[in-house]
Amino acid sequence: MKVLLTSSMAAIIIGAGMLFVPAPATGQGVNPANAAQYNQVSKAANLYPTELVELFTSQGCSSCPPADKFIASLADSPSTLALSFNVTYWDYLGWKDRFGQKVFTKRQKQYARSLGIGNVYTPQMVVNGVAHSNRFTRKQIMSASLSDDRPMFELTPSGSVLRVSSANDADLSDCKLTLVAYKPGLQKTPVLRGENRRRTLENYNVVKGVYEINADTQYSLDRSEHEDGLAYVLLASDVRTAEIVSMTQMLP
């Protein structure tokens, strides 16, 4: 699969005011008369999330299941994208994480440098690239929304090509672009050894690949080796601070 970067494109066919309307709080109903508009807003929020939560977790870590559960609980917020990055440095404890990749450990270490912390740890949640903790509340996450005037991108599939386009002539000079592939939903794993032995763990939105994109070149990604049903999200981050400034995803 090829990823093509283009500098501009036609405006998104959704009113700008609709892109950033928050979904109703949990337990708040939707007026049937407004259901169609709400569905459009929810779809837009899913494609252009405003809060990113990256959970660095491990199936070999006994402290991680509560954080895994919390990440899954965010599924009802269309504006929030929660991703599970399974790291590898606890594999020696007796259970090799079946989703673990060294590139995810590398990403966590990069955050450690940009956040000014000495060591990596699990579970660690990083919100929009600038705040980290082993525990956040929903309220804290929902208050971390991206700016309404952020640069906007679109991911458009065309056969074997995935086009990455700027929707508002965004300046990419200060941005780092990263494409993340993940499996939407819950993945269950019976753990036979290690600190979580005899438990069935659930990981939500498990990341399967991270690909850096050079905005000045054509980027090629061969999807033929990927499993079916993956979603892709383009993350634009500040090259100096690692702060996430924009997100666009393509759902399966």
Image (spheres, helix red, strand yellow):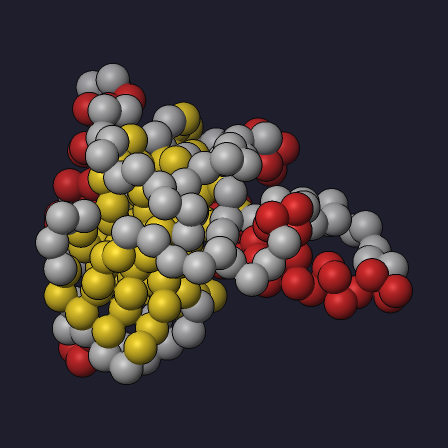
At a point 41% along the width and 41% down the height, the residue shown is: 151
Residue 15: percent from left, percent from top: 63, 54
Q: Relative to 51, say whether 251 is above or below.
A: below
Residue 107 visible in the current orientation? yes
Specify whether 180 is left or right of 55. Answer: left
Residue 127: percent from left, percent from top: 43, 34
Specify whether 182 is left or right of 139. Answer: left
At a point 79% along the width and 65% down the height, the residue shown is: 35
Quarter of the image for the C terminus: give it: bottom left
Q: Nearer the viewer, residue 249 or 127?
A: 249
Tell me where residue 242 sits by quadrant.
top left
At a point 74% along the width and 45% down the height, the residue shown is: 25
Q: Relative to 198, say whether 148 is above or below.
A: above
Residue 66 visible in the current orientation? no
Residue 154: percent from left, percent from top: 39, 58
At a point 63% along the width and 33% down the height, the residue shown is: 139
Specify whether 79 is left or right of 92. Answer: right
Total numbered circles = 0
Tell me where residue 129 sits by quadrant.
top left
Quarter of the image for the N terminus: give it: bottom left
Q: Nearer the viewer, residue 39 or 214?
A: 214
